[in-house]
Amino acid sequence: MSEGVKIIKVIDSHTAGEPTRVVVSGAPDNPGATPTEWREFLRNEHDWLRTAVACEPRGHEAMVGAFLCEPTQPNSVAGVVFFNNIGYLHGCIHGTIGVTATLAHLGRLAAGDNKIETPTGIVTVRAPEEGWVTVQNVRSYRHAAAVPVEVPGWGTVHGDVAWGGNWFFLIEAGDMIAVDFSNLDRLTDFTCAVRKALEANGITGEDGGEIDHIEVFGPPANDEADSKNFVLCPGNQYDRSPCGTGTSAKIACLLADKKLAPREIWRQESIVGSVFQASGEFVDGQVIAGEPVCTPSIRGTAYITSDSEMVLQDDDPFRDGIS
Ligand code: PYC
């Protein structure tokens, strides 16, 4: 490597339209750290890695980065920390599907089931079968049903607060707003207003968990899907995929309301028309705040789009990205 130059190897993919950039090498050392410890180490001491990879000029607002680390458990294949243009995510299922396709591309995945460590817990991924990857997510549940919030310019909006690896506010669009690609600006304005209103009114997930993802549901355009969604992500960008953690939160609500049976398939269409297949199973007898706990499974496809090296030159004023 030349002096004054740092090389970071990344593999890009998209899962149902949503990008994932996996950092394969070029990160600082932190031997033996778990994904949660890695996340704090990166956040506090090496945030340049996130900004260089996810922010402009190398990244963009919709980019989700995934930092691959050594597993700490003997039966896991890898650990992962997810991040984006504004910070670090708890979990990310489109990203986990992208990581799985990337590990397969690198020849680092066994056939069948593999375990990946994340800050939210261990997820089980099934090696791609004809391009389809299945992820068994962490336990998911609804925290509160039909919560009213006054949204300036929109009136009283009701939504469910649920955990699917991130905190979500899930809203049925009804006649309020069209869940359609042609309506992206209005959907973004609406969901940003809802997120601000939740914050202003102190509405959170369990233990004060910030609700940083807002999900709106409408009728599907695809005959084979059950519903279409728009998901606002923390960096004010929308998820191009149906959002795996958001679909997990939806499954938890559907199971709790008995609108879906255990193991029944739910097909969630995204705002760009891609589809995840999802299902859930109750976790024996487990209840949080009176709501049943479930384990969702999400199935989707990912494609590798680039296998490259990023060059960080010390004399580049935007070496670490624009943030
Ligand atoms: O698929 O879980 C997901 C996700 C979270 C943020 C963007 N995608």
Image (cartoon, rainbow, N blue to C red):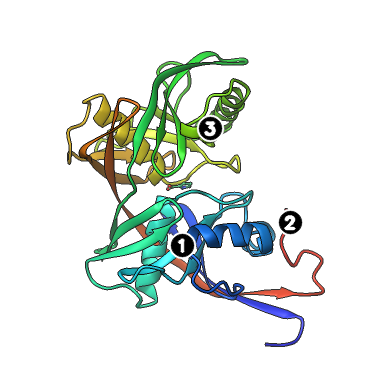
Answer with mark 1 or mark 3, whichever residue precedes in sequence. 1
The residue identified by callout 2 is 322
Number of the front mark, 1 or 3: 3
Q: Estimate how packed mark 2 is, as few (under 14), some (14 to 19) or many (20 or more) residues with alpha carbons within 10 Å.
A: some
Q: Position of residue 227 (x, y in %)?
A: 32, 32
- Element under label 2? loop
Q: Estimate how packed mark 1 is, as few (under 14), some (14 to 19) or many (20 or more) residues with alpha carbons within 10 Å.
A: many
Amino acid bearing label 3 = Gly
Question: Residue 277 vs residue 186: left or right?
Answer: left
Question: Residue 270 vs residue 48: left or right?
Answer: left
Residue in the image at 34% along x and 35% along y: 141
Answer with mark 2 or mark 1, whichever residue precedes in sequence. 1
Asked if 176 appears above or below 273 in the picture, the reply is above
Amino acid bearing label 1 = Val
Amino acid bearing label 2 = Ile
Asked if 47 appears above or below 226 in the picture, the reply is below
The residue identified by callout 1 is 80
Question: Residue 313 vs residue 32: left or right?
Answer: right
- Element under label 1? strand
